[in-house]
Amino acid sequence: DAGITQSPRYKITETGRQVTLMCHQTWSHSYMFWYRQDLGHGLRLIYYSAAADITDKGEVPDGYVVSRSKTENFPLTLESATRSQTSVYFCASSESETQYFGPGTRLLVL
Amino acid sequence: AQSVSQHNHHVILSEAASLELGCNYSYGGTVNLFWYVQYPGQHLQLLLKYFSGDPLVKGIKGFEAEFIKSKFSFNLRKPSVQWSDTAEYFCAVSSPNQAGTALIFGKGTTLSVSS
């Protein structure tokens, strides 16, 4: 039972580079979410998706792009990474009102 | 807009001490309430949730929380903490009856338990 996985788990990149964080879930949940976790802010929603090809912005979407061509995958792309995007990124999925989280990706932008 | 306040940023306890972590939310309507725990280096795990019914909710690992509607609160409690409870705890809310509604998180409370 793989559940929800994220890759890579750790990533170091440089300012201006494009980075894609992957999220995969095996439950066939309709809803998927991307959050970032920062000290003093808790978790904040970046983007979410209600189904394949349906996505919408969350609280902090600037600088990020998402896509959802398949139900099980929800990649998050930083088009041109900035230092302020150094964070821990969590993917989550749900079919009802309870969300289940992946292990997170720790991203450092130098 | 909904918001969640966790009043305790960092709590330090000795083993066997009792725990209560505060959580207040601001929203005029009905909400779903959650407590998640994040152990060091791990992902968020659901501790317990409240949707409706009995306002005293029991979760995993001996945790419980009480929903007090008049106080807009959902405090987390445990009668006797263990060293393994050292973690970060997040309170969250969402709108009810809406699958796929995003969670609004508090900023978290770090619990350190000394043996």
Image (cartoon, coloured by chain):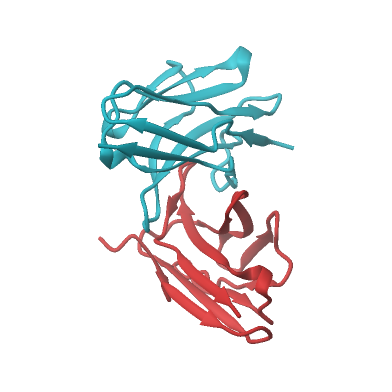
The quadrant of the image that shows the C terminus of chain A is: bottom right
B91 relative to B30 in the view: left or right: left
Residue B75 placement, left or right of A47: left
- A29 versus A19 height, above or below: above
Corner quadrant of residue A103: bottom left
- The image position of residue A72, as x and y in percent, is 44, 67
What residue is drawn where x is 49% and y is 60%? A90
Q: Position of residue B48 (x, y in %)?
A: 39, 33
Location of residue B83 in the rendering, given as x and y in whole percent from the top left corner: 27, 39
Relative to A93, residue A11 above or below: below
- The picture's colour for chain B is cyan
The tint chain A carries is red
Q: Residue furthest top?
A: B70
Viewer-nearest residue: A2 or B17: B17
Residue at point 41% right, 72% down?
A: A9
- Report the quarter where the N terminus of chain A lies: bottom left
Q: Nearer the viewer, residue B39 or B98?
A: B39
* Relative depth, front residue between B41 and A21: B41
Q: Residue B84, how many percent across, how many down?
A: 27, 41
- Residues B84 and A101: in front is B84
Numbered marks: total: 0
- Residue drawn at point x = 47 percent, y = 55 percent: A93
| Residue positioned 29% across, 34% down in the render | B60
